[in-house]
Image (cartoon, coloured by chain):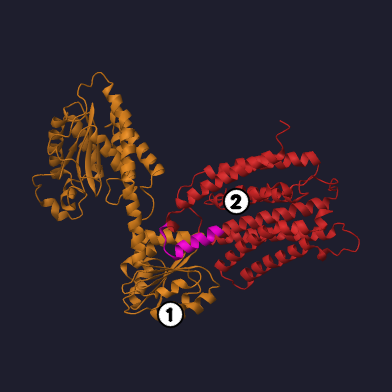
């Protein structure tokens, strides 16, 4: 039995198309049952997330035949079970004819693909870990309903091990790649713990809110919101379970806070060195992290020269995120080497089985000649 | 194996400290990114050999091995190495060994100079428990000050990287700067308490008739050092001195200790009785 995969992902198709093929979790067991009864697959797992819909199947068929059958199944299912739609209006539309949107991979590429997906190498945010949990859930669902057997059980367990190995031995998941998470990581480098830290949000902008939420999720004690529109400040403060203060009062909070996030629309600096210097004295030199995500900037860069003040603007944060991403990208080759190495024993074990007559096939079927774009 | 003396064991320990120093440079150039245990185990092996060397010498003379400059220096380094191993067990403090290894290596090389280890004269009298307590607390306080200087070095590097937005600050596995400052202050406090006990017990020890305690060069030097550390502690804890200045002070104070320790010990009459 060889393992094939067919599907579509954020790399090959837009969300409007993906959502038509998405499987609701409740429908997956019956879909797997139908797939196995059709004789296309002996074992199968359906992975359906916002970024990809994939069917992993262990089949006795030649890959080209399996791909034809799986494509028909996928298209038929899209008319019946689609439900992860971001916009239900699209559900009414017909499924178009396909070009390169659907990919089909036979061994060994199918194995490499699963290992890459599990390791986050094929994710929209390179190296993210959420996908591994989603694969585990998809496998658990199929396993629970007895739609997996020796072949897929072994393959998925191997995929989880490979993902763990890659996470431990490479930097593919290291560092933060969003402004909010970089800010949290910075706070982690400055303060002993984020628990009990007070955060001041000056200006209730979207990015400021995201940073504040990220800090809260990591244990920050409370959020104080200052905004020119006091109503908006109150709304955001209520959402973040913090408190709102009038905009002109924000400097009065500086002796209590540890982190300030500024994102006002002010055309000039609202915080400069002469203003901050006396405030730092009243803080008895406790460290202060200032995150200025406003354009034009709210905080005079000269304040960074003050003792115990750490100022980062939006460019600094984005530059760190970009560096992390670059570092992750540089790790791809290492990860792929690990994947090829880890897939080899699995492939060899299949080749050693006497009943297996066909060796590793090239990608065939639909647009089988179209390989996935490079990660 | 009688030809293999305690000095040979110490030499091997210094070789391991040197190896750790080279590895530390490698870790530093890599930005302290990987939390591996190699450096810890090199230092552990070094301290084990170091302990063996000191035990061997201690057993030979049936006394605490602090009777000449070589022995005092090796005791100091041993206290530093041991404290480093203990503190490295704290989360994210593995790299403390990387900052301590250069001190262990350079001072170890210094200690190996033959002139620092002249043959013993009359057997020192350590039957007085105060004398043992004095020697042990003083040298352990040096170890604590040394470790504080290593933590302060980590703080200064990490703070510089954070101030100037260096990616290394984010990638390294060093502790947060607030934690480093806390550890530095605690180590200085521990060292200061031990140092104070050492000085007080030293004052109780017998000395030549009519020779005041404060007339000995090493006692004067120790009193000066005590005042330096007192000033650092008081300024930081009660007058809000900035962390940066405090940590720079800790590094300078320990550098002063290392550079002048040998000289004052050499000219000390009380310590050559």
Number of numbered discs visible in the structure rendering: 2
Q: Camera-side residue: B3 or B215?
A: B3
Query: Horizontal and vertical percent for residue A226?
Result: 39, 75
The magenta region covers B153-167
Is label 2 in a helix, a strand or a loop? Answer: helix
Asked if the stretch drawn in magenta spans residue B157, the answer is yes
Chain B display color = red
Q: Quadrant of the N terminus of chain A?
A: top left
In this rendering, position of residue B225 left or right of residue A219:
right
Asked if the stretch drawn in magenta spans residue A149, the answer is no
Q: Is residue A122 above or below residue B270?
A: above
How far apart marks 1 and 2 lie (CA) works out to 44 Å
- Residue A149 visible to an observer of this rendering: no
**Do the dots labelled 1 and 2 sit on one chain?**
no
Q: Camera-side residue: A203 or B134?
A: B134
Q: Chain of mark 2?
A: B
Per the image, the residue denoted by label 2 is: B87
Query: Horizontal and vertical percent for residue A290?
Result: 42, 69
In this rendering, position of residue B132 left or right of residue A8:
right
Chain A display color = orange
Q: Is residue B183 above or below residue A266?
A: above
What is the magenta segment's predominant secondary structure? helix
Foreground mark, 1 or 2, reads 2
């Amino acid at each position: 039995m060889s393992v094939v995969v067919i599907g579509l992902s954020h790399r090959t198709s837009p969300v409007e198309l993906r959502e038509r093929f998405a499987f609701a979790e409740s429908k997956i067991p019956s879909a797997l049952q139908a797939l196995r009864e059709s004789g296309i697959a002996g074992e199968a797992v359906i992975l359906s997330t916002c970024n990809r819909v994939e069917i992993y199947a262990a089949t006795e068929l030649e890959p080209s035949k399996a791909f034809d059958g799986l494509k028909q199944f996928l298209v038929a299912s899209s008319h019946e079970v689609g439900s992860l739609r971001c916009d239900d209006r699209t559900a009414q539309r017909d499924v178009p004819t396909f070009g390169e949107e659907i990919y089909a991979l036979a061994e060994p590429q199918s194995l490499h693909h699963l290992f890459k997906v599990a390791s986050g190498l094929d994710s929209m945010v390179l190296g993210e870990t959420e996908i591994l949990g989603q694969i585990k859930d998809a496998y658990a669902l199929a396993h629970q309903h007895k739609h997996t057997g020796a072949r897929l059980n072994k393959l998925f367990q191997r995929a989880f091990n490979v993902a763990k190995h890659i996470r431990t031995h490479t930097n593919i998941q290291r560092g933060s790649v969003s402004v909010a998470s970089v800010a949290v990581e910075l706070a982690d480098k400055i303060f002993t713990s984020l628990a009990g830290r007070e955060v001041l949000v000056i200006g209730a902008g979207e990015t400021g809110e995201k940073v504040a939420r990220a800090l809260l999720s990591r244990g920050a004690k409370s959020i104080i919101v200052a905004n020119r529109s006091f109503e908006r400040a109150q709304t955001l403060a209520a959402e973040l379970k913090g408190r709102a203060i009038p905009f002109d009062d924000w400097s009065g909070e500086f002796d209590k806070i540890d982190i300030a996030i500024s994102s006002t629309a002010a055309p000039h600096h609202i915080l400069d060195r002469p203003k901050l210097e006396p405030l730092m004295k009243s803080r008895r030199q406790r460290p202060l992290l200032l995150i200025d995500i406003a354009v034009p900037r709210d905080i005079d860069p000269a304040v960074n020269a003050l003792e115990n003040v750490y100022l980062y603007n939006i460019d600094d944060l984005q530059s760190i995120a970009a560096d992390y991403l670059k570092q992750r990208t540089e790790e791809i080759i290492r990860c792929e080497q690990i994947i090829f190495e880890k897939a080899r024993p699995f492939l060899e074990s299949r080749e050693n089985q006497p009943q297996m007559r066909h060796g590793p096939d090239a990608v065939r079927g639909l647009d089988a000649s179209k390989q996935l774009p490079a990660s | 194996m009688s030809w293999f003396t305690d000095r040979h064991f110490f030499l091997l320990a210094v070789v391991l400290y040197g190896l750790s120093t080279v590895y530390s440079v490698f870790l530093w150039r890599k930005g302290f990114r990987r939390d591996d245990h190699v450096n810890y185990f090199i230092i552990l092996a070094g301290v084990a050999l170091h302990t063996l060397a000191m035990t061997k010498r201690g057993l030979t003379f049936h006394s605490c091995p602090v009777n000449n400059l070589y022995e005092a220096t090796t005791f100091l380094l041993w206290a530093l190495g041991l404290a480093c191993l203990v503190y490295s067990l704290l989360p994210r403090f593995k790299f403390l060994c990387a900052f301590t290894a250069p001190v262990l290596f350079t001072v170890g090389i210094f200690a190996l100079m033959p002139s620092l280890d002249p043959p013993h004269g009359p057997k020192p009298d350590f039957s007085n428990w105060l004398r043992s307590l004095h020697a042990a607390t003083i040298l352990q306080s040096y170890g604590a000050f040394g470790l504080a200087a290593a933590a302060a070095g980590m703080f200064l590097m990490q703070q510089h990287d954070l101030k100037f937005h260096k990616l290394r600050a984010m990638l390294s596995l060093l502790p947060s700067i607030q934690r480093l400052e806390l550890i530095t202050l605690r180590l200085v406090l521990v060292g200061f308490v031990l140092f104070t006990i050492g000085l007080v017990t030293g004052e109780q020890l017998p000395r030549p008739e009519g020779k005041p305690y404060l007339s000995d060069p090493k006692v004067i030097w120790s009193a000066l050092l005590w005042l330096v550390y007192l000033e650092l502690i008081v300024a930081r804890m009660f007058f809000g001195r900035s962390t940066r200045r405090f940590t720079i002070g800790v590094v300078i104070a320990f550098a002063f200790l290392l550079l002048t320790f040998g000289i004052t010990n050499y000219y000390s009459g009380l310590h050559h009785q």
